[in-house]
């Protein structure tokens, strides 16, 4: 293996004089006393390799020895990933004994001693390719498929498969002979370099079906699909993290991977504390059972921040290859971009806009395109849905990270400061946000078949009402309450009704926090019916009064359990109230 | 921070800038502490055997033949119980005329706490100020700054929060503090009879700006000693972090780094996060809470310093002068405590979350009405009532001179709502309305 010695140190960038071949993105270790600090080569010039150290570099000296690993940054994939809390380099955080994160400490990702009940799925003599299922073990709530490693080239023939029985992840489970006649032994662990996408699937079709998040403003108004991509930009304090946590809790996926990238440690602690206690209604088990957390919080070394998003994506792709529905959340991709900027800056590269590296858009595009729904070799479907948050500097959406992301992500959930200020949560902008999936014919058909005929059309109608209400509001603000026709007030209050009674949702209320699709369908139909009925009013005060009261009834319904007695009582009260208004209209119509 | 006598002495500086100097030396560790002509300095760059040192006190008068001595380790602080009641400079040396503190030497700016060893912060930290306790409730282990224009009385508010917070230790990190403010803190703490539990690291406006870079690390290292080793409830006050960030940009500039937004170094986010993330609630009950001050330029929170801070801290407390009542208030819109959800309605009364939101929503309506009035439109009866409510709300709840318990704040909230509004206008859950709503 190649060895080297440090010649320069600036912050976490080191230059190494090497004695042999090195490759771009190769991993190397700086020997510092008894510990070894992991680093990654990011540039090579002659016999000098430039590497970013994934740890604090305090105390390193010129002349310190460096050992090269011969491989890129790889992670271990196998049973035992779920319920774990990893750092950005897949160290198992619970395995690190010390209170403080001492540099160079390593804790294995997977438990090599634990025994799993292995069940073979493939037979001797069967022809297999990378990603094909050899057998399965049960991991928490899922059936974890043991696969032919993704780096296996071409086809091979199974010469032996382990029988049903208790095995550790290091025990061999199959032997496969490749076309050249060489026999390979496989156990349950495989390694994969995180910066390369796992592509062991047959086909990657266009996304077509909804992935429910339990949030009305997303599922109804701007739905994300299974295998879709979305991003949430917003200034600080507009509820990005609350929104992501809420999606992580209620998202209708088999597996949730949460990547906390350069964010606050206490937010991760919240997940650590809550997820083992919260019950997932779909499985009856705790949320922790279907979750894996990759966290590189803001005070952890900046270069492993970059690695953490790739680690999260690679784990997501691994579970997708088992035919599972995976939801990957990354908070925040801006911190990752900033890590790229810090390194680019130290390498003295010519800067692009806002001092970010010139290839930032390409890096972001490559990353988002790893999401998607795929058809596996055996015909099963698996998906990685990706939602990333973006933290635009100064809340200005015309900055490089937001702009680059908007070119690749199909759903845009803009968090608005004004909405957050007036506590209209989730603060997702009602008019400017979009989901391009609403325009996919296959998605429209899916909703027709599975929710109700003409659903997408009705959603677009709701958007029109919101836009109309917005325009009316502008007119009222310019001309004054009295100077505009009463209809303007009605238009405005229709959009307020959709906003207050449907789009706003209380993430901290036990009932309101999660709204399943059948409830959304019921409430959306109800709200839309009320917002399209032509109630008539004498003056604008009557309009305000009527809609405010109506909103109040609808909100009480949101706070009560669906179709419970309380819910029905509120519904009756609403019906009665609306009926009275209809009667008033009718009486005045007769006169 | 002390030099060791047996180290080799170098006397051949090859380059001197306003903040750094360079020399040829061997066996030097990255970030090692050195002394240049007796002035403390730190290794910031190693290029072969060329060592670049950042001299905290500045390079005025440093010659190419100045004596340079390396200490063999990064900057340290001697920690012990004897620190209570003492005042130190940025290097941890006493400035109160007292003796040196003997204790265990600890490297400053060490690694952060493993997230899985943290506990979810959920212990209420009451201040008596309704703009904080009611709308933006704090908990121990939180990190939060005051955002304030330079003319707001932020240091006074900081001092009263510190004294009311019932902490075991208060650690003040003063950066670029005016001498008057330094004396204000000293006198306030002394008069409160609490001096023994206060430890101060002070860099005044007269001291060299680059020295400020050491203050937060010194304060947090001392804080960690009390919070982790002694399991105490520690409050670290950092004022003013804007001046800290300015010092960062000076050094980055001298090191020829490409500046990013607002001439700040590209690593500003990481530099600030490293400090703020020291805030922690330990499993054993000890905690380190950071309350900082970030001064703004005419309320501009889009500037890189407050902007990056906002993304790091768990909220911000925005101080603003309300001209209607002539007092400084905690702005209910732009302020936020992210961890309030951990305590409101749980450690405090059940109606807390809903009352808090309803009051802010009504206040937002009042601001809309105010705009309407300024634009010369007629106000509706509702608009009029919101305006009257806003004045009352501002004066009796938002002003920073309020000092009452949380229950009393909630009672005042209900009182105001029923005084100015009808029940359907406040949008609160029915079961709470049944219990607390009293029509005047």
Image (cartoon, coloured by chain):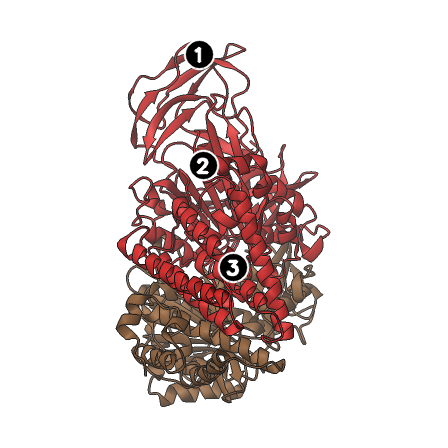
The spot of residue B346 in percent (x, y) is: 29, 66
Q: Among the chains, which one is brown?
A: B
Q: Name the residue that disc number 3 marks.
A: A534
Residue B338: % across, % down: 43, 64
Q: Are marks 3 and 2 on the same chain?
A: yes
Q: Toward which corner of the image does residue A437 lie, by quadrant?
A: top right
Quarter of the rendering containing residue B9: bottom right
Residue highlighted by disc 1: A126
Query: Between disc 3 and disc 1, whose residue precedes?
Result: 1
Chain seen in red = A
> As drawn, is A272 to the left or to the right of B47?
left
Could you tell me if residue A391 is visible in this image? Answer: no
What subunit carries mark 2? Answer: A
SS state under label 1: loop
Residue B245 versus residue B36: which sits nearer the camera? B245
Q: For mark 3, give the secondary structure.
A: loop
Q: Which of marks 2 and 1 is nearer the N terminus?
A: 1
Residue drawn at x 40%, y 25% as measured from the top left: A146
């Amino acid at each position: 293996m190649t060895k080297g010695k440090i010649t320069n140190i600036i912050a976490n960038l080191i230059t190494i004089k090497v004695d042999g071949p090195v490759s771009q993105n190769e991993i190397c270790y700086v020997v510092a006393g008894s510990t070894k600090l992991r680093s990654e080569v990011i540039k090579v010039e002659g016999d000098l390799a430039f590497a970013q150290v994934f740890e604090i570099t305090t105390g390193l000296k010129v002349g310190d020895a460096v050992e090269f690993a011969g491989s890129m940054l790889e992670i271990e994939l196998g049973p035992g990933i779920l319920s774990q809390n990893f750092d950005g380099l897949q160290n198992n955080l619970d395995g690190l004994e010390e209170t403080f994160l001492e540099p160079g400490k390593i804790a294995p990702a997977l438990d090599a001693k634990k025994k799993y009940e292995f069940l073979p799925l493939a037979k001797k003599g069967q022809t297999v390719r990378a990603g094909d299922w050899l057998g399965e073990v049960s991991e928490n709530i899922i059936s974890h498929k043991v696969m032919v490693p993704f780096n296996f080239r071409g086809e091979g023939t199974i010469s032996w498969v382990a029988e049903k029985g208790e095995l550790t992840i290091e025990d061999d489970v199959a032997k496969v002979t490749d076309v050249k006649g060489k026999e390979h032994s496989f156990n349950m662990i495989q390694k994969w370099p995180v910066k390369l996408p796992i592509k062991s699937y047959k086909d990657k079709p266009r996304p077509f079906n909804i992935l429910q998040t339990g949030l009305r403003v997303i599922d109804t108004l701007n739905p994300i699909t299974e295998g879709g991509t979305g991003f949430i930009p917003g200034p600080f304090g507009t509820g990005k993290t609350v929104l992501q946590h809420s999606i992580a809790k209620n998202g209708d996926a088999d597996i949730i991977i949460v990547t906390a990238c350069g964010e606050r440690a206490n937010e991760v602690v919240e997940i650590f504390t809550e997820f083992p206690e919260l019950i997932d209604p779909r499985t009856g088990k705790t949320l922790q059972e279907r979750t894996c957390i990759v966290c590189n919080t803001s005070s952890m070394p900046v270069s492993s921040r970059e690695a953490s998003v790739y680690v999260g994506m690679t784990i997501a792709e691994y579970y997708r290859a088992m035919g599972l529905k995976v939801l990957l959340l990354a908070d925040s991709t801006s911190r990752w971009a900033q890590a790229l900027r810090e390194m680019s800056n130290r390498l003295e590269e010519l800067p692009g806009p806002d001092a970010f590296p010139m290839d930032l858009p390409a890096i972001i595009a490559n990353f988002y395109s790893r999401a998607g729904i795929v058809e596996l070799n055996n015909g099963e479907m698996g998906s990685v849905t990706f939602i990333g948050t973006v933290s635009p500097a100064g809340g200005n959406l015309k900055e490089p990270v937001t702009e680059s992301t908007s070119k690749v992500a199909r759903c845009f959930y803009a968090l608005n400061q004004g909405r957050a200020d007036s506590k209209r949560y989730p603060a997702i902008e009602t008019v400017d946000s979009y989901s391009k999936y609403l325009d996919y014919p296959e998605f429209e058909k899916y909703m027709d078949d599975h929710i109700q005929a003409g659903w997408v059309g009705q959603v677009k109608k709701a958007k029109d009402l919101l836009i109309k209400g917005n325009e009316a509001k502008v007119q009222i603000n310019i001309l004054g309450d009295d100077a505009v026709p009463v209809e303007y007030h009605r238009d405005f209050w229709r959009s307020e009704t959709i906003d207050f009674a449907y789009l706003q949702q209380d993430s901290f209320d036990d009932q309101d926090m999660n709204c399943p699709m059948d409830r959304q369908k019921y409430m959306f139909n109800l709200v839309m019916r009320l917002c399209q009925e032509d109630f008539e009013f004498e003056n604008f005060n009557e309009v305000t009064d009527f809609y405010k009261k109506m909103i109040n009834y609808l909100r009480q319904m949101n706070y009560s359990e669906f179709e419970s007695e309380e819910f029905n009582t509120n519904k009756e009260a609403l019906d009665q109230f609306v009926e009275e208004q209809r009667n008033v209209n009718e009486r005045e119509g007769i006169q | 921070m002390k030099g060791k006598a047996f180290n080799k002495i170098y006397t051949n500086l090859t380059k001197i800038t306003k903040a750094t100097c360079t020399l040829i030396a061997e066996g030097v560790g990255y970030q090692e502490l050195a002394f240049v002509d007796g002035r403390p300095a730190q290794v910031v760059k190693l290029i072969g055997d060329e060592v670049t040192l950042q001299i905290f006190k500045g390079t005025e008068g440093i010659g190419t033949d100045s004596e340079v001595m390396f200490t063999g380790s990064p900057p340290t602080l001697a920690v012990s119980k004897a620190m209570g009641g003492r005042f130190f400079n940025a290097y941890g040396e006493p400035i109160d005329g007292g003796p040196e503190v003997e204790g265990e030497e600890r490297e400053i700016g060490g690694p952060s706490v493993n997230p899985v060893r943290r506990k979810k912060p959920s212990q209420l930290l009451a201040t008596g100020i309704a703009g904080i306790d009611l709308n933006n409730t704090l908990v121990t282990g939180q990190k939060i700054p005051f955002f304030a224009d330079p003319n707001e009385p932020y240091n006074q508010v900081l001092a009263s929060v510190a004294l009311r917070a019932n902490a075991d230790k208060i650690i003040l990190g003063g950066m670029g503090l005016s001498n008057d403010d330094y004396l204000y803190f000293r006198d306030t703490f002394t008069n409160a009879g609490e001096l023994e539990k206060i430890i101060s690291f002070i860099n005044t406006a007269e001291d060299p700006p680059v020295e400020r870079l050491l203050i937060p690390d010194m304060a947090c290292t001392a804080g960690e000693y009390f919070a982790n080793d002694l399991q105490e409830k520690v409050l670290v006050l950092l004022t003013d972090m804007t001046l800290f960030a300015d010092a960062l940009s000076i050094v980055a500039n001298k090191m020829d780094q490409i500046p990013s937004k607002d001439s700040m170094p590209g690593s500003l986010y990481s530099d600030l996060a490293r400090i703020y993330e020291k805030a922690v609630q330990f499993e054993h009950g000890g905690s380190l809470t950071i309350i900082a001050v970030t001064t703004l330029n005419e309320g501009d929170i889009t500037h890189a310093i407050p902007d990056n801070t906002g993304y790091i801290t768990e909220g911000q407390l925005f101080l603003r002068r309300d001209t209607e009542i002539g007092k400084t208030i905690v702005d209910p819109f732009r302020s936020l405590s992210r961890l309030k959800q951990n305590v409101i309605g749980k450690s405090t009364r059940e109606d807390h979350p809903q009352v808090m939101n309803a009051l802010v929503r009504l206040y937002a309506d009042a601001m809309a009405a105010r705009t309407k009035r300024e634009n010369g439109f007629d106000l509706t009866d509702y608009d009029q009532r919101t305006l009257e409510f806003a004045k009352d709300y501002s004066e009796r709840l938002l002003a920073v001179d309020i000092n009452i318990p949380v229950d009393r704040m909630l009672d005042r909230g209900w009182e105001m709502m029923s005084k100015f509004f009808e029940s359907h206008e406040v949008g609160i859950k029915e079961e709470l309305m049944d219990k607390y709503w009293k029509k005047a």
